[in-house]
Image: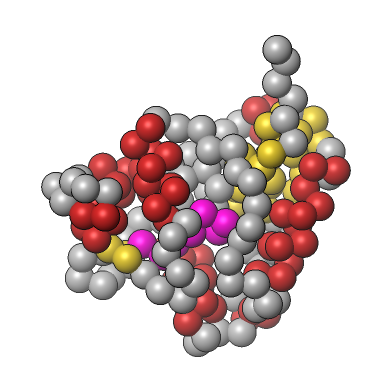
Amino acid sequence: MTTTVRHTVVDSPYEPLTLVAVDGVLSRVHMTGQRHRPPEEAFGAADPRPFDEAIRQLDAYFSGELTEFDLPLHLVGTPFQVRVWERLLRIPYGETRTYGELAEELGNPAASRAVGLANGKNPVSIIVPCHRVIGAGGGLTGYGGGLDRKQRLLAFESGAAEPAGLF
């Protein structure tokens, strides 16, 4: 069976975002200069058709009208990574969790470092809200898109910044 990979690039307050779909299902959202970003040739042919709903929801999010994405996702990772990413989807808009809290929710309080590593490899930035995870003391720690972007996303979601003021 042949897998079809397609991508498109859309504007956002975070510079262009590259959206990638596998067999028509969103599997990646990458920011420019993001850590763990695969090479461009892994994104498949350019084709905006599989992304209409994702683009609509991202636009609504950035305009402050959407607080929860409702998109099918094709998450590829280890079973533990996928469990972490699925848990991230449960963190409400405007709220944060620590790595330790997520580890506890996953049933392994000693796994905060592993949660951090899985969080850092999240392939679907913004939609799977890894930016909502903070350090034990409440400080901002690692973010594949850069700490400045993480800080701005959290400020935006808390109401401390207007969407247009993100960047």
Describe residue 65's horizontal placement relative to residue 152 as left or right: right
Identify the image quadrant of residue 101.
Answer: bottom left
User: Which residue is the extreme one toward the bottom?
Assistant: 160
Relative to 76, residue 95 above or below: below
Q: Is residue 129 magenta?
A: yes
Please state, as top left, top right, bottom left or bottom right, where the C terminus lies in the image.
Answer: bottom right
Q: Quadrant of residue 19?
A: top right
On screen, 109 above or below 141? above
Does residue 29 belong to the magenta stretch?
no
Q: Tell me: residue 35, above or below residue 46.
A: below
- Give residue 58's position: percent from left, percent from top: 69, 62
The x and y percentages for residue 97 are 32, 66
Q: Residue at horizontal 72%, vertical 30%?
A: 23
Of 166 and 79, the residue lying toward us = 79
Quarter occupied by the N terminus: top right
Vertical comparison of 51 with 102: above or below: above
Q: What segment is highlighted magenta in the picture?
A: 126-133
Q: Is residue 150 visible?
A: yes
Q: Position of residue 21 (x, y in %)?
A: 69, 37
Q: Which residue is at 44% across, 48% downward?
A: 86
Instruction: Give the residue at x 27% y 49%.
Output: 106
Looking at the image, can residue 146 be seen?
no
